[in-house]
Amino acid sequence: MLGQQIVNGVMLGSVYAMVAVALTLSIGVLNFLNFSIPAMFMIGGMATWAFIHAGLPWPLAVAAAMVVVGIASLIVELFTWRWMRGAEKFVPLVSSMAFLILFEHLAIALYGSDLRTVNAGFSQVDLRFGGLVIGIPQLIGLVCSIVLIGCLSLLLNRTKLGRALRTIAEDSDTALLLGVNINRVVPIVFVVAGAFAAFAGVIFALNYRQVHPFMGEVVGLKGISAMIIGGMGNIWGSIVGGLVIGLVEVLAIGYFGADFVDIAVFGLLLLILFLRPTGLFAGMTTARGGI
Amino acid sequence: MSGYLEGILVLLAVNIVYAYGAFLPLAAGQLNIGLAGFAAIGAYSSAYVSNVYGVHPLIAIPIGGVVAALIALVVAVPVLRTRGIYLALATFALGQVVQASLLNMSAVGGAAGYPVTAFIRLPVVVGFAVVVMLLVWLLFTTRFGIAARAVHDDERVADLMGIEVRGFQVAAFALGSLISGIGGGIYAHHFSFIEAQYFNITLSITIVLYVLLGGTQTVFGPLIGAAVFTLLPELLRGSANWRYVVFAAGIIMLMALRPQGLITGGMLRRLFDWRDPFVKSPGAAKERVT
């Protein structure tokens, strides 16, 4: 029983980890908490549902949803970064909160606020090890998440683009002086972060088979917690944070009941902020934006 | 007066009280996105004393505020150890924990919600809002306002000037929670029913948006911000589904065109030729440049 719960916790945790990576990328490079990331998660899930509902097969629906998220991320970039450089520091945060409200209510205006069932068209196949049940689609989702996060880590540490991003993370003005084309590089951060969140939304929609205009808030808040627990700006920390939150959530449901989940998860977050405000792993990498 | 208009005015008064609750920490440079938690503490504790001990709402509501402030004082010590974004996130986690705890507290109804027997009418609600507003305005004519502004603009310089930075931060945090708790108490006693689900992160964020949009430079910002952004969505009620879309788009445009908020110190000085104590603050200088 405990083994099964750990499996479920890891599956759920991988979704949180993806959202946490998206958030940590924003905060690590751009130094603001991008509240539109939960909206990208929701758009990923809702758009996948909408395109499947409109008759597309699920792989095409997923691709179309990712395109929608890419466009949405670029719009967010204009209003939270490009046209806001030099504004007071809370401005991007406020604008991104407004984008969360905007996208959620846009989804309601277009599709209503009901819980929608995603009919993906592939059937659930399970692997069985002893007493453990592991869903193959879930396992594929988990593997894809880990591979994507690994690719992102390689991109940041090994490529020219990654070096440019790390320079912006240190100081965007200096990066500009050193010849980094900020207006070309920063949109990539928004699109990549949006794509990670959206991919998590797609996995969520296809695995748990349901979507909702406010699905991003619930998962986004857990993603923020995962990011803090792992240490802001630390990609591998986010994965640990996501898995910790996923496990705590599943174990809290298993042993104390569903009502206890938020107390356990956010209580843990509060405790970690009190004891070690920079998260568990911040000290392991260089300064701020040590990605 | 029609029920609809009365409902709007009550909502406006409650939102104004909440906005001043968010204004105090913001004026001292803290982004508190857990205010809904303190509003919930105020709402539930005032409802509890008026339901169980039969305390009059006029006394029960301030009691709720004081309870919220006391809890804020207790958590202020560890929470205010964190800075900047960590502080915002600690308050966020705190709000979530309060909401989740109330959902599990069977003494106050848990997830089913908590009915409140005592009832206050519109004039009392407005009275509370006016008193809160006047007290904050009075507070900001004293040394407190200047010191809070100094801490907001630059903690280190404020410290050098001999301002007890930590004390002001704790005071702003606790007073903001007190006012939020009073707002929650008013809400509980007018609408006669509270549920923990109402006091969620969206409420906290909306309250902070009112203040940031109205402007944090003067004490009039929260009033204008809460008024505009309570009444504006009502005007758009004809297109019920789209009004929040329009509201959010409005916020984004306002941030793009006027990031310092609707009301600024410089604007008031130009309009009324005021001498205001913040005129020499770096915030005012920055504003002239932008």
Image (cartoon, rainbow, N blue to C red):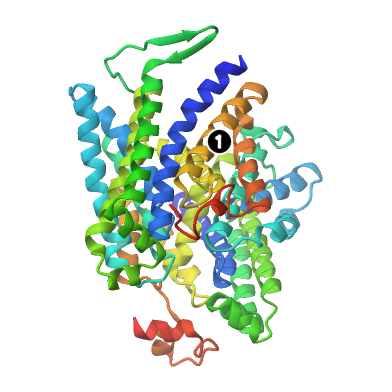
Say which of A185 and A287 sits in front. Answer: A287
Q: Nearer the viewer, residue A57 or A289?
A: A289
Q: Residue furthest front?
A: A158
Question: What residue appears at the point 23 percent right and 62 percent down from the top-left corner?
Answer: A183
Q: How many marks?
A: 1
Quadrant of the snapshot with the N terminus of chain A: top right
**In terms of image quadrants, where is residue B107?**
top right
Instruction: Specify whether B87 is left or right of A19.
Output: right
Residue identified by numbered label 1: A245
Front-most of A155 and B36?
A155
x then y, percent, for residue A53: 23, 24
Quarter of the image for residue A83 reads bottom left
Whether residue A58 is visible: yes
Q: Label 1's element?
A: helix
Residue at 62% x, 18% y is A2
Q: Residue at x 51, y 22 (%)?
A: A8
Q: Determine if residue B6 is in view.
A: no
